[in-house]
Image: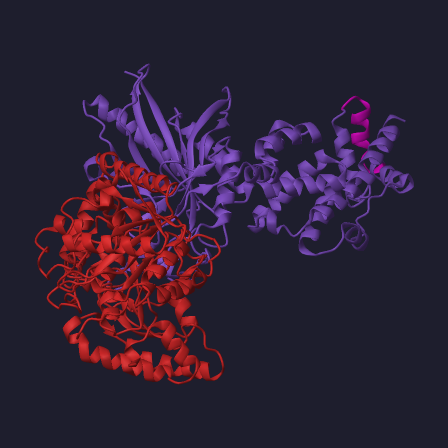
Chain colours: A red, B purple
Amino acid sequence: MELHTLTIHQLHQQLKNRTVSSVEATKALLTRIEATDSRINAFITVAADQALAAAEAADQRIANGDCQLLTGIPLALKDIFLTEGVRTTCASRILENFIAPYDATAWARLKSQGAVLLGKLNQDEFAMGSSSENSAFGPTRNPWDTDRIPGGSSGGSAAAVAAQQAIATLGTDTGGSIRQPAAHCGCVGLKPTYGRVSRYGVIAYASSLDQVGPVTHDVTDAALLLQTIAGHDPKDSTSIDQPVPDYRASLTNDVKGLTIGLPKEYFIEGLDPDVQASMDNAIAHLKSQGAEFREISLPHTSYAVACYYLIATAEASSNLARYEGVRFGHRAKDSQGLIEMMMQSRAEGFGAEVKRRIMLGTYALSSGYYDAYYLKAQKVRTLIQRDFSEAFKQVDVLLTPVTPTPAFRIGEKTADPLQMYLSDIFTIPVNLAGICGISLPARPASNGLPIGLQLIGRPFGEETILRAAYSFEQTTDWHRQKAAL
Amino acid sequence: MRFQPVIGLEVHVQLNTQSKIFCGCSTRFGAEPNQNTCPVCLGLPGALPVLNRQVVEAAIMAGLATNCSIAHRSIFARKNYFYPDLPKGYQISQFEQPICEKGWLEIQLEGQAPKRIGITRIHMEEDAGKLVHGLGSGSGVDLNRAGTPLLEVVSEPDFRSADEAVAYLKQLHQIVTYLGICDGNMEEGSFRCDANVSVMPVGSATFGTRAEIKNVNSFKFVKAAIEYEINRQIDLIEDGGRVVQETRLFDPNSGSTRSMRGKEEAHDYRYFPDPDLVPLVISADWVERTEKELPELPAIKRQRFITQFGLSEYDAEVLTAARSLANYFEETAAFAHNPKAAANWVMGEVTRALNDNGLTIDSCPVAPRRLADLLHLIDKGTVSNNIAKKVFELMWQSDKEPAAIVEEQGMAQVSDSGAIEAAIDQILAANQCQVEEFRSGKDKVFGFFVGQVMKAMKGKANPAVVNDLLLKKLKA
C-alpha cells in the first residue's frame, strides 16, 4: 500500500516494525500534497522543512525504542490551532502573518508523542461558515467533486483526509464544523463532549460551543486521536477534570442491547431522498447487528439554528475584539488617530461573513436587546439540553443524518446566508447541548457523493458512540472508498 | 431654596496578591514595560483565563469585614469596550451575581450620631494596562498592570456630605489594609475612588441627576472634588440650568471638575457571562474558615484596647489607625506591664522619631521588646522619664539593650539620699534670698530649687527623692 493512504494504526505498526520510517511517510505525504493541492486548496501553509525535521527526530526516537501511537505520524491541523513557529492565520487577512509564541494544548499533546506537523489547513475564516468558501486564502474544494464545497468550517481538515494528504487531521466543531465536512468528504469526524478536550491555544469563535476533535479515515483512528488529546488542562477552566477512558476498549463490534433513538424532528419531509435512503440503509445494518430502534422526540429542535446564531455570534463579537491592530495582526496604514486605526484595521482584515456575525452578536448583546435575544437564546438552549437529557433516559444513542443534502456546489449558497446557515440544522443542537457526536460514512448518494451518518451520545458518552460507529463500520466498506484524484 | 447633596462611592481596591487574577504573571510594581506578561494577560489568540484562588479569598475577607453576604455562586462577566490598554477588547469583571452583596459600614462624625452606610456589592475584576505617551514616534502600551486583581466596592447613595464620604473611605481603607489584602498606597492608585454626586431640594423624595467624578486618589481630593461638584450643581440649578448626567474629571491643581463625556457618549458595555470561566462556587465551609482566620478589625480592636488596657477613646483611636502600629503597641504593652506608659511612648517618642526619620512602624529600629525594657527601667526608678528619652535616642542609633546604655553612659538615677542632701545643702546656702521667699509663702520658688538640684546632679537625681528632701529642709 502506498504510504499516503494509510491510517494511523496501520502506519504505526509499520513504524514500530521499522519497515518504514517517518521520513519516508512524511515525504510521501508532502509529495501527495504537492501533486494534488492545487486542485483542492486544503492547505494554507505547508511546513515541509519543519515536518521533515520532526520526522527525523521521530525516527531517532523510534530507533531508541520509543514508538508511541503518534510518534512519526504525519498529521495536519486546522489553521485555528496555535503552533509555535508555524504561522496561524485562522484563514483571515487579519492574522495573515501571525506566528504564535506557544502551542495549543491539543497539538502540544500530539507533539510530545512525536507527531509530525505537515502544515495548516484551510477553513472558513474564524470558523464561521459551512462551506470553507469564507477563507481569505480561497475556497477549499471537495476531493470527490472539485466543483463542490467540502463543507465547513473544518473543510481543509476533511478534504486533506479525503485527498489522502495527511494521515489524519484535527478540526474544531462549534455548530457542526467537524461532522458536516467529514460527512461531505466521506471521512470520520468526532465532536467530543464540551470540556473533554482543552480549548487552550485554539482561536476562539464561540467559547461555550467550540470543541476540538479528530477527522480520520476510520473510527479506530478517531478513537486513537481522541485518546491523546482528551483530558483536563489546568489552563482551560472549562475543560473537565474527569478520567479519560480507554477508547480503544470500546471498539468491540457489538451493538447488542443498544437502544438507538430516531428523533422524529430530524426525519422530516423534504429531506434529500438519497440522504433518507442512506439513513434507512444504516438503520437496517445496525438492526441486523442487534441494535434496537425507537422513535423519540426532541421538541425544541426547530429553535436550534436561531438560538445558535444568537449565542455564537454574541460570543464571537466579544472574542474577536482583540483583533484591532494594536499588539499583533494586521494594522491599517495611514490611518488618522487611534480609533480610526482600529476601525480601519478591522475593516480591512475581516471578511464579509465575520463582519456579519460580529454585527449580529453586537446587536444581540446591546442594551435594550439583550433580554430579547441573548438571554432568550440562553433559555432556549436550556430547553434543547433538556430535550436531549429526556431522550437519553429512553435510549443510549441517537441516529440522525449529518446534513440535509450531500455537498452543494461552490457558490450555490454564498448569496443567501440563511440557506447556508440551515445546512447545519442537524449538527447545531449537539453543540448547544454540549454533548458528543460522530459523523461517519454511510451509503453514498446515487451520484457517488458521500453521505454522513451521525451518532449522538450522552455527555462523556464517547465510548458508546464509538462502539456503535465501529460496529457499523465493520459491516460496511464505505469508509474505504476514496475520491479519485 | 436649600439643597441636599446625595453621594455614592465606587472604590477600586488593588489587591496585593503575588500573581495576577487570571494568569501566573507577577504583579510586582516597577518592572520593565511588558516584562510581567504572558499570552493570557497579553490577550493573545487562544489564551484562556484561570481564576486565582487568592483573589477569591481576599474578596471573601473584604465581604465579611463589611458585613456583606457571600454568594454561594457568583459569575464573571465580560465588559466590552475598545481601548489600546485593554488587550482582549473586554475586561473580565462581575456584573449580575457578584461575590459579595448587601453589606454596611458604620461611620461617626464628631458630635453626631453613628450612621450606617449601605454597601451594595463588592466584585472582583482585572485591571487594564497603561499607555505611555511621549515616546517620539508614537505612544506605547505597557501591559504589566493588565490583569492585576481589583475589588470594586460599591456603596449605596447614603452620604449626605463630603465629610461622611471621607469618613467612610478612611474606614474602608483601614479595613482593607488591616486585612492585609491591599497595600493602601493611594498615590500609586492601590486605593482609588469614583464619586457619584447629585443634589436635590431639601425634603425631596427623588434624587437629582448625578455626575460621576472619576479616579480621585486622595482623601483630600475626594473632599475637594465632592464639595466643588455640589456647589457647581447648586449654582447651575439656581441659575436656571439643569445638571446633565455625565462623567467628570477632578483636576487637583485647580480644585475643580470638568466634563469628560456625556450620557450620549456613554459606553454600552454589552455585559454578558464570560463563557471561558465556570461559575464560582464558594462553600459555606470556605466562608467559615476564612471568617475564623479573619484578623481583628479596627473597630473591635479599638474597643478592646479601651477595656483591656484602660486607654482613652482618643488613644485607642490613634493606636489602632494601622494594624502594624496596633501590633507594635500591643507587643510593647505585653512586655512592659504598663499599658498606659506604653501607649504614651508609642504615640510620643516612637511616632516622633519615625516621622523625623521618614520611617514607618514596620521599619522601626527599636523593637517592642527593647522599648518595654526601657519602660521597666523607668518603673524601677533606674532612670527618670527625661533620661529615658535620651536612652531611647541612643537605642535608635545602636542595637544595644537600654540597661547597657544606661550603664555605659552612667545615666543611672541617683536615689542615694546622702548625695542628694549634700547637693541640696549647697543650693540652699547659695540662694538664701529664695529660701526666705519660700518660707514667706511663695510656693512657686519650689520649682526653682528642684531645677537647680537636678542641674547640679546632671539630671540623674531621683525626682521623688529630691522633692522629698527639699521639702523637709525648706520647712525645717
Q: Residue at x 32, y 52 (%)?
A: A287
Above-or-below relation of A394 to A28: above
Overall secondary structure of the magenta stretch?
A: helix
Above-or-below relation of A258 to B343: below
Count of labels in the image: 0
Q: Is any part of residue B29 visible from this angle?
A: yes
Q: Residue at x 60, y 49 (%)?
A: B362
Q: Is residue B36 left or right of residue A476?
A: right
Residue nearest the observer in this picture, A431 or B356: A431
The extreme right residue here reads: B418
Q: Position of residue B468 (x, y in %)?
A: 85, 31
Residue nearest the observer in this picture, B219 or A169: A169
Q: Position of residue B161 (x, y in %)?
A: 39, 26
Q: Position of residue A101 (x, y in %)?
A: 35, 68
Q: Is any part of residue B44 visible from this angle?
A: no
The extreme top residue here reads: B203
Q: Is residue A55 left or right of residue A417?
A: right
Q: Which residues are magenta?
A: B429-442
Magenta span includes B438: yes
The part of the image, by quadrant, that contains residue B48 is bottom left
Magenta span includes A165: no
Q: Position of residue A97 (x, y in %)?
A: 24, 69
Above-or-below relation of A160 to B139: below
Residue nearest the observer in this picture, B271 or B332: B271
State the quadrant of the C terminus of chain A.
Answer: bottom left
State the quadrant of the N terminus of chain A.
Answer: bottom left
